[in-house]
Amino acid sequence: MNNYKKIINDFVNLFQIGILTAKDIKQEISNIIKFKKEKIMNHFNNSSQQDLEDLKNKIKNLNLEIEKLKKLVRKR
């Protein structure tokens, strides 16, 4: 909620100064939405990438363990 208040206060301050036009407001809102969307997408992409790396490491470790067990069975 504080973030929204901060954004609204920023817009109000800019209106008071007379810097923003309607086009600038539209562009600023568009940029904020794009940034939020990219942040969320990166979060999900990074987590799935990390999960993939974890699975690869587990598979590698399991393959090593299988090879060790095969060697033990061959010796007997």
Image (cartoon, rainbow, N blue to C red):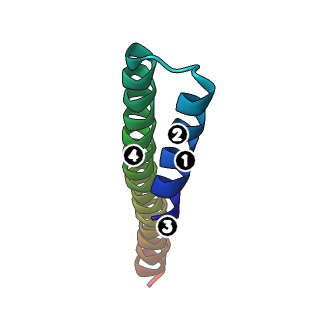
**N-terminal label among 4 and 2:** 2
What residue is disc 4 on? 45
Q: Nearer the viewer, mark 3 or mark 4?
A: 4
| Image quarter of residue 29 | top left
Distance CA(mark 4)–CA(mark 2): 35 Å
Q: Residues within 10 Å of mark 1 (few under 14, many from 20)?
A: few
**N-terminal label among 1 and 3:** 1
Q: Residues within 10 Å of mark 4 (few under 14, many from 20)?
A: few
**N-terminal label among 3 and 4:** 4
Contact, mark 4 vs mark 2 (Cβ under 8 Å)? no
Secondary structure of the residue carrying tag 2 is helix
Which residue corresponds to the image point at 36% horizontal and 23% vertical from the top-left? 26
Identify which amino acid the numbered label 4 is placed on: Asn
How many marks the image carries: the answer is 4
Contact, mark 4 vs mark 1 (Cβ under 8 Å)? no
Task: Give the label on residue 9, or none.
Answer: 1
Identify which amino acid the numbered label 3 is placed on: Asn
Q: Residues within 10 Å of mark 3 (few under 14, many from 20)?
A: few
Identify which amino acid the numbered label 1 is placed on: Asn
Identify which amino acid the numbered label 2 is placed on: Val
Secondary structure of the residue carrying tag 1 is helix
Left or right, 34 with reference to 12: left
Which residue corresponds to the image point at 55% horizontal and 47% vertical from the top-left? 9
What residue is disc 2 on? 12
Residue 59: percent from left, percent from top: 40, 62
Residue 51: percent from left, percent from top: 41, 59
Q: Quadrant of the C terminus?
A: bottom left
